[in-house]
Image: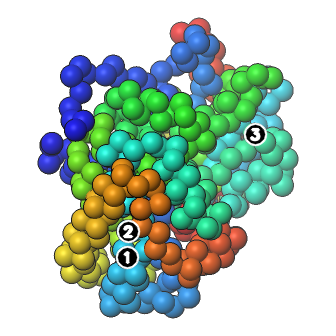
């Protein structure tokens, strides 16, 4: 395994489209639920334990080599919001484009052929991690980190929040993030035995509802 | 457990920069239009569509900063049918979407190309950047040529200030020359400064308030398409 490959994949500058998505932060800022570093931290903690854990489980399972069609269906089942499903597939397509150019591999070509309209981003992330020679736990870490890194960056842009404070939030969440990634990787092993139902299915109804509302705003900075 | 691949898998042009597709057909020429907010990018795109749509199969991708106004303007003006106009969202960072992470724009361009592949393959895709600053230029992975649009009202010292857009764009357009007398901009000075910054690259002064004000830029685009098809 290459630790450096993990850095490349997790880098916010990896050109896979994430910069245009706020992970629900734009809607939460508008609603007043995120207004400073403390409320950003609370938002991220909630997201990490729900959307983050689910994404990490799917990514770890895909990195383990579980069937991507089944995993994609599992992702759909765990994503009730049509707006978030559409965003996840779009981001999946964008990540796959970057991944195929960065770590050319037959698995990635097969994934592209199986999902011309895009697979859910965490599934693509897992297969990408595999193609980059990374472990399921690595994939889980990236997914969990993205689930909070996106909102933190978006909040810096939306609120003019001090970027050092935003980094502090992410640093304070690091131990929880490790635990979420480990839980996700363990669930992926269970899923290999028992099928995708063993993967985490935590939900965050408010994120789903506000994502639907956000998608209908005529004026917004972020795509989701 | 699966780890590194025994053999290196061949690299492909998955970013679709290659001029020819796998089946040998030539993809559309992609031209980016960038420049500061309000300089006349959308107006130039609209004028180019009107001037060129009878000759070429065209489409437009817009990158609004936080609205769909550019796309909606083009739709309202009916410069092209709606299915030929796509909007990309940029997360408050227009330059990121055209330079550092071009994935969403490439998706949009390719979707348009695919949609017209059967009936009338696209000859030209115009990609309008959201209004940004003087350093915002397009990635070569996204466009084949770029036009940087500034205007006389933004200050006649902009060509002198230079920056990547002014100095390196394939075509520099100085727009709204009709306003020069009102804002006290010295067009000769702008032309001299631009020539100095651009080492021979072309500069066009235009006013879209004039009848067929876009004709010089339209001719430049025609030449680019001719060169693209001949290559
Ligand atoms: N007087 C004059 N006005 C112009 C000319 N070209 C464009 N405009 C006007 O300038 C304003 C801005 O033009 P747009 O084409 O929307 O500018 P833009 O660069 O697309 O703006 P953003 O996308 O917001 O960055 C509009 O009101 C246009 O009608 C011109 O040649 N002369
Ligand atoms: Mg515009």
Badge 3 local density, few (<14 within 10 Å), some, or many (20+)?
some
| Residue hosting label 1 | A49
Disc tally is 3
Image coordinates for residue A122, horizontal then vertical, percent: 42, 54
Eye-nearest disc, 1 or 3: 1
Eye-nearest disc, 2 or 3: 2
Element class at badge 1: helix
Between B30 and B20, the one lying in front of the other is B20
The answer to whether the residue bearing label 2 lies less than 8 angstroms from the nearest atom of ligand 1 is no
Proximity of marks 1 and 2: CB atoms separated by less than 8 Å? yes
Badge 2 local density, few (<14 within 10 Å), some, or many (20+)?
many
Element class at badge 2: helix
Image coordinates for residue A187, horizontal then vertical, percent: 33, 61
User: Residue drawn 24% across and 77% down?
Assistant: A176
Task: Name the quarter showing ligand 1.
Answer: bottom right
Q: Is residue A112 above or below residue A86?
A: above
| Residue hosting label 2 | A53
| Residue hosting label 3 | B84
Q: Is residue B207 left or right of residue B161?
A: right
Tell me the distance, in whole angstroms, between the alpha carbons under discs 1 and 3. 42 Å
Q: Chain of mark 3?
A: B
């Amino acid at each position: 395994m290459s630790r450096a490959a993990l850095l490349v994949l997790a880098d916010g500058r990896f050109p896979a489209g994430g910069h245009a998505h706020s992970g629900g932060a734009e809607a939460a800022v508008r609603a007043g639920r995120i207004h400073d570093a403390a409320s950003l931290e609370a938002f991220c903690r909630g997201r990490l334990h729900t959307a983050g854990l689910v994404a990490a489980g799917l990514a770890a399972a895909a990195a383990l080599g579980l069937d991507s069609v089944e995993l994609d269906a599992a992702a759909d089942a765990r994503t009730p919001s049509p707006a978030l499903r559409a965003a996840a597939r779009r981001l999946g397509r964008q990540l796959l484009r970057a991944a195929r150019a960065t770590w050319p591999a037959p698995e990635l070509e097969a994934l592209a052929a199986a999902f011309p309209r895009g697979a859910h981003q965490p599934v693509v992330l897992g297969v990408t991690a595999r193609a980059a020679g990374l472990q399921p736990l690595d994939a889980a870490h990236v997914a969990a980190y993205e689930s909070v890194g996106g909102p933190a960056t978006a909040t810096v842009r939306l609120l003019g929040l001090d970027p050092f404070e935003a980094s502090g939030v992410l640093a304070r969440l690091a131990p929880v993030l490790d635990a979420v990634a480990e839980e996700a990787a363990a669930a992926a092993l269970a899923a290999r035995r028992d099928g995708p139902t063993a993967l985490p299915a935590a939900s965050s109804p408010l994120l789903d509802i506000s994502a639907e509302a956000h998608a209908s705003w005529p004026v917004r900075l972020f795509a989701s | 457990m699966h780890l590194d691949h025994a053999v290196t898998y061949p690299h492909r042009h998955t970013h679709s920069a290659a001029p020819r597709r796998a089946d040998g057909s030539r993809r559309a020429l992609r031209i980016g239009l960038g420049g500061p907010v309000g300089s006349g990018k959308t107006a130039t795109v609209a004028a180019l569509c009107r001037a060129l749509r009878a000759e070429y199969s065209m489409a437009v991708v817009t990158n609004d900063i936080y609205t769909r106004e550019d796309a909606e303007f083009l739709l309202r003006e009916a410069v092209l049918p709606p299915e030929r106009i796509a909007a990309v969202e940029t997360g408050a960072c227009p330059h990121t979407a055209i330079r550092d992470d071009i994935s969403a724009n490439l998706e949009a361009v390719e979707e348009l190309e695919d949609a017209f592949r059967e009936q009338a393959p696209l000859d030209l895709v115009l990609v309008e950047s959201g209004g940004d600053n003087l350093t915002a230029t397009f990635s070569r992975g996204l466009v084949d040529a770029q036009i940087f649009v500034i205007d006389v009202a933004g200050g006649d010292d902009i060509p002198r200030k230079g920056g990547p857009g002014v100095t390196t764009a394939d075509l520099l357009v100085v727009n709204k020359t009709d306003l020069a007398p009102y804002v006290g901009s010295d067009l000769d000075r702008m032309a001299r400064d631009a020539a100095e910054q651009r080492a021979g690259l072309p500069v066009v002064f235009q006013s879209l308030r004039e009848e067929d004000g876009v004709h010089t830029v339209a001719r430049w685009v025609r030449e680019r398409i001719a060169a693209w098809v001949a290559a």
